[in-house]
Image (spheres, grey):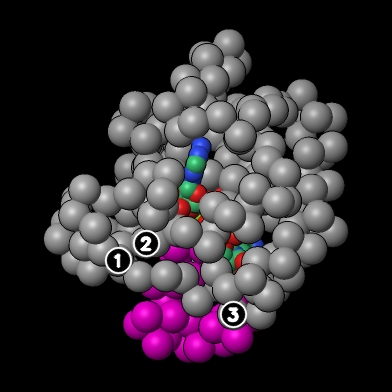
């Protein structure tokens, strides 16, 4: 399954719940790149500036990472792609090495996105996502899943959020048409609460299966 949608639409939040529900892994290229940045690897160092500017990372780098990850045994019964593909070129290439059953587009207006992303907190250790108001950790600024400190992503600054939205509309939104033509698109209203969105996605996916 692919989770499509603008930055802050709730892809990561939903992926976490859906992974447990369907017992399949989530592959988030954003999370993979952030891990490379933390490890100060050559890939991480080359991607750092792009991420902080809200730009996309090069298609070849993303596709190389994804292709390798999909070879792991935990992907054999299925997987959730969170935030990938993000360009038509990536979507075309993925057709060559992965079977996609469904592309779920989580729809959300730009004004709501700014509010969602400015209150987001993320656990740097286990990757869990929270929101200070809408989905707080039971332990305040500490992750209630693993006990590590919560942090704010460096690309969640207002200027960068606007840039990411711009990049989304220009480079990623055309994928909605792409997957409509492929007969795989399901659109979900991302303005609902987290539990209702999960229910809607599960219903949409079960119709496809
Ligand atoms: P990535 O990590 O994928 O970021 P993104 O797409 O910008 O999306 P986000 O993670 O910001 O949002 P989300 O939809 O996951 O929302 P979340 O669930 O956290 O990519 C980062 C960067 O990496 C890119 O900019 C690019 O540079 C690079 N990159 C990654 N993949 C790439 C690719 N394929 N090609 C090229 N470059 C790539 O929710 C947001 C907040 O809202 C949270 O605080 C959450 O708690 C809250 N929330 C969620 N749902 C609800 C709800 N229903 N109601 C209220 N609050 C909610
Ligand atoms: Mg995310």
Q: Residue at x 71, y 51 (%)?
A: 111
Q: Is residue 153 left or right of residue 171?
A: left
Q: Residue at x 52, y 15 (%)?
A: 203
Q: Are marks 2 and 1 in contact (CB under 8 Å)?
A: yes
Q: Residue furthest top?
A: 207
* Label 1: element kind: strand
Q: Which residue is mark 3?
A: 52
How far apart are the alpha carbons under marks 2 and 1?
Answer: 5 Å
Q: Nearer the viewer, residue 67 or 44?
A: 44
Q: Which residue is mark 2?
A: 122
| Percent coordinates x, y for residue 180 in the rendering | 80, 29
Mark 2 Cβ inside 8 Å of ligand 1: yes
Q: Which residues are magenta?
A: 26-51
| Percent coordinates x, y for residue 17 in the rendering | 37, 35
Label at residue 150: 1
Mark 1 Cβ inside 8 Å of ligand 1: no
Q: Which label's residue is closer to the chain start, 2 or 1?
A: 2
* Label 3: element kind: helix
Can residue 59 be seen from the camera position used here? no
| Percent coordinates x, y for residue 62 in the rendering | 59, 65
* Quadrant, the N terminus: top right
Q: Is 97 drawn above or below residue 23 in the view shown? A: below
The quadrant holding residue 122 is bottom left
How far apart are the alpha carbons under marks 3 and 1?
Answer: 19 Å
């Amino acid at each position: 399954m692919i989770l499509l949608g603008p930055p802050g639409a709730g892809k990561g939040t939903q992926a976490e719940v859906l992974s447990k529900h369907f017992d399949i892994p989530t592959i988030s290229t954003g999370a993979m790149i952030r891990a490379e940045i933390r490890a100060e690897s050559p890939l991480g160092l080359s991607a750092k500036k792009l991420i902080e500017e809200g730009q996309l990372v090069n298609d070849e780098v993303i596709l190389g990472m994804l292709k390798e990850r999909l070879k792991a045994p935990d992907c054999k019964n299925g997987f959730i792609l969170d935030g990938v593909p993000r360009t038509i070129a990536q979507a075309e290439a993925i057709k060559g090495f992965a079977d996609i059953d469904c592309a779920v587009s989580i729809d959300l207006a730009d004004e709501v996105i700014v509010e969602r992303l400015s209150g987001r907190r993320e656990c740097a250790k286990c990757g869990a996502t929270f929101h200070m108001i809408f989905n707080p950790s039971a332990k305040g600024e500490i992750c209630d899943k693993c006990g590590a400190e919560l942090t704010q992503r460096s690309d969640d600054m207002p200027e960068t959020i606007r840039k990411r939205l711009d990049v989304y509309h220009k480079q990623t939104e055309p994928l909605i048409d792409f997957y409509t033509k492929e007969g795989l698109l399901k659109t979900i209203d991302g303005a609902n609460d987290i539990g209702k969105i999960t229910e809607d996605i599960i219903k949409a996916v079960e119709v496809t299966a």
